């Protein structure tokens, strides 16, 4: 179990650093598109973090939460993109 | 046998961690907004896919039961990441490009984002 635990901690560190870099890009973005892209990347990284936490604890309850976050992230990104393209979301 | 599967799972986890890290590092490393589109949509999707493969192998090899709803998340991400990338690229064409600054669109004349019909060109269907 030692090898897998260390691998899980390493992957936690990688995705945690990834979330921090996306946060940095959201703060210092040069346009709306980059900001939306960074938010979408952050959602994907969060899904990976939740699945990893479920793997570490050995429970399955995080998969449903990860699924819901994936759907919400997609819907919110599409809503942002439509707002940037058309000026409103539901015509 | 258990150690072998643990090493395989650790391999997938480390690969996915590196991919996720590289994908988000591209967000702050690349200068051009459209170059930045590479980073999250490819590498981070592969990163999450690696974590989910590791999770499937963990439940299959170490807990001896088949759990496939990780595949749902993978399928969903593989379907939605190109759609998101397409929307953001369309936004970039809409805001920052003119029909003259893009390459030739061939027989259609204009790219689809610029070929939106204006109000005068829309045919009137109210009479029929």
Image: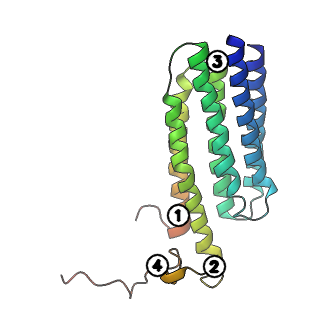
Label 3: state its secondary structure: helix
Quadrant of the rendering where the C terminus of chain B is positioned: bottom left
Q: CA distance from mark 1 to mark 3?
A: 39 Å
**Which residue is tagged 4?**
B116
Q: Is residue A30 above or below residue B128?
A: above
Which disc, if any, is residue A83?
A: 1
Picture coordinates of residue A16 (x, y %)? 75, 36
Q: Do pointers 2 and 1 mark residues of a single chain?
A: no
Picture coordinates of residue B44 (x, y %)? 67, 44
Q: Are marks 4 and 2 in contact (CB under 8 Å)?
A: no
Lower position in the chain sequence, tag 4 or tag 2: 2
Lower position in the chain sequence, tag 1 or tag 3: 3
**Which residue is tagged 3?**
A57
Q: In this view of the protein, which residue sits in the foreground, A44 or B52? A: B52
Quadrant of the rendering where the N terminus of chain B is positioned: top right
Q: Is residue B19 above or below residue B53?
A: below
Picture coordinates of residue B79 (x, y %)? 51, 48
Image quadrant of residue B11? top right
Q: CA distance from mark 4 to mark 3?
A: 52 Å
Neighbour tally class for label 3: few under 14, some 14-19, many 20 plus, Cα within 10 Å: few
Q: Is residue B103 above or below residue A57?
A: below
């Amino acid at each position: 179990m030692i090898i897998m635990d260390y691998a899980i901690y390493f992957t936690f560190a990688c995705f945690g650093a990834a979330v921090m870099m996306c946060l940095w890009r959201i703060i210092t973005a040069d346009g709306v598109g980059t900001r939306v892209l960074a938010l979408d990347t952050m959602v994907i990284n969060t899904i990976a973090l939740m699945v990893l936490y479920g793997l570490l604890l050995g429970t399955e309850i995080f998969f449903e939460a990860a699924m819901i976050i994936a759907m919400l992230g997609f819907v919110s990104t599409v809503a942002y993109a439509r707002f940037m393209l058309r000026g409103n979301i539901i015509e | 046998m258990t150690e072998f599967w643990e090493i395989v799972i650790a391999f997938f986890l480390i690969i996915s961690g590196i991919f996720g890290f590289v994908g988000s590092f591209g967000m702050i490393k690349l200068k051009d907004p459209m170059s930045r589109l590479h980073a999250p949509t490819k590498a981070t999707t592969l990163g999450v896919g690696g974590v989910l493969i590791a999770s499937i192998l963990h439940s299959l090899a170490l807990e001896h039961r088949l759990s496939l709803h990780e595949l749902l998340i993978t399928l969903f991400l593989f379907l939605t990441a190109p759609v998101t990338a397409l929307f953001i690229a369309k936004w970039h064409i809409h805001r920052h490009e003119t029909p003259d600054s893009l390459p030739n669109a061939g027989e259609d004349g204009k790219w689809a984002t610029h070929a939106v019909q204006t109000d005068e060109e829309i045919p009137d269907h109210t009479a029929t």
